[in-house]
Amino acid sequence: MHRILWSTTLILLATLASAGENHSAPADLVAQIRQADYEGNRPALQHLYEQLTPFLHDQVISSRIRYWRGFALWRRALNGFNDSVDPKEIEHDLQSAAAEFQQAEALDHTFADADVARASCLSNLLYLHRADAVRVQEFAAQARQALKEAETKAPDNARLTWVQGPNLWYRAGDNEELQKKTIESYERGLQVIRSQKANTSDPLQPSWGEPELLMNLAWSNLHRKTPDLDASQRYAQSALDLVPNWHYVRDILMPQIQKARDIAEIQKLRDRDIAASKTGDFETLKSLFTDDSVLMPPGAGFVRGRTNRELAMQDIRELTSHYDVLEYSEDFEELNIYGNAAIEWGTIRGEMRQRQTGELIRESYKVMRILAKEHGQWKISRVIFNEMPAAKFQ
């Protein structure tokens, strides 16, 4: 009798151990899927999708296995958008992912996250077929239904906020108030998901969302009608603090934010140049150049370095002291930024009036400037300009 009980106990323990191993294996694959998603590793996502196949027969976790198989293909598609992959390949991944999510929901009708993810797949399929009105209506109706079901099951699901946000954003267009509301929805979602962190213990249950919401906040603040570049960079850095290897944020979004900051700072440089030129503020004009700057004015030699530049400006100050500047404008047609250097070219126009005679003088110059960061500030490093024919100007 004791042997029978002992044998039964061993069998039970072995069964429980086997079940534990069976569930820890897919949990490890899920962790790898999340990592591959952040790294933008599309081949790994395809491979991991296939590796989850043997666990589909386990009825206890089959709905979650379907979800993570769909997740792998969904994120493979989203990363494909970033890497300019063939749209047909992206469409195939989205269709397959949507089917997995639909099967996950069929296995567990309370599974709101399956509806959330499926809605995102359908919205992205809509985008791929945006030129086909019939397909747009088809995917839009399906996406709305999936979102409605998710809202009914879990209205406070922060991942639902993450998926709904882009739809709200694109409907907002240039309406700043609606853009602000979208950003506020992301912020509420972020608060919710942070409050739920301690309640998440099942590795197969979706718990992602905090880094993703931070990313959306960074993107939205960058692209809003009046960009908030400080907020954009702050949110992007917070996302990287959580996921340092996130390919999209680190290698795509962050450089976009930095470029926007550089463009804004260069425009400030231009504005200071224009304002100082209009008022004859030569002290400000001096400060706009790097210490080693070189000026190449028409009909003259090179003006190298600070000393020669300030002597040249003194001559210009004397020359223009008998004139009133009526207009001064800069129209740069192209700006290319290369790290801490930039090149821009365009036209500078001015109009002055001789105080004694009232004579008007109009001038127009073709100009090319090389800008450089000096002590963290954009300044003019090299500039060459020559006169544009008067007929062209008028």
Image: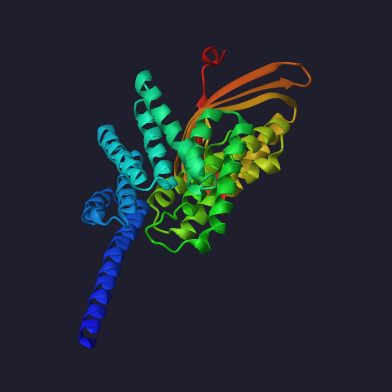
Residue 83: quarter of image: top left
Judge by depth and name the residue closer to the eye, 390 or 267: 267
Counting labels gives 0
Residue 310: quarter of image: top right
**Furthest-right residue in view?**
356
Res. 287 in view: yes
Image coordinates of residue 77 in percent, x first then y, are 32, 41
Image coordinates of residue 150 in percent, x first then y, are 47, 41
Name the side, left or right, on which 106 lies relative to 229.
left
Res. 339 in view: no
Please state, as top left, top right, bottom left or bottom right, where the N terminus lies in the image.
bottom left
Query: Is 176 above or below relative to 288?
Result: above
Q: Residue at x 38, y 34 (%)?
A: 122
**Furthest-bottom residue in view?**
2
**Furthest-front residue in view?**
1
Name the side, left or right, on which 57 lies relative to 248.
left
Image coordinates of residue 157 in percent, x first then y, are 51, 48
Name the side, left or right, on which 355 lies relative to 251.
right
Colour pattern of the rendering? rainbow
Please state, as top left, top right, bottom left or bottom right, where the C terminus lies in the image.
top right
Image coordinates of residue 118 in percent, x first then y, are 38, 40
Query: Is 172 above or below relative to 200?
Result: above
Judge by depth and name the residue closer to the eye, 61 or 185: 61
Q: Residue at x 47, y 51 (%)?
A: 209
Residue 265: quarter of image: top right
Judge by depth and name the residue closer to the eye, 34 or 281: 34
Q: Residue at x 66, y 19 (%)?
A: 361
Q: Residue at x 57, y 28 (%)?
A: 174
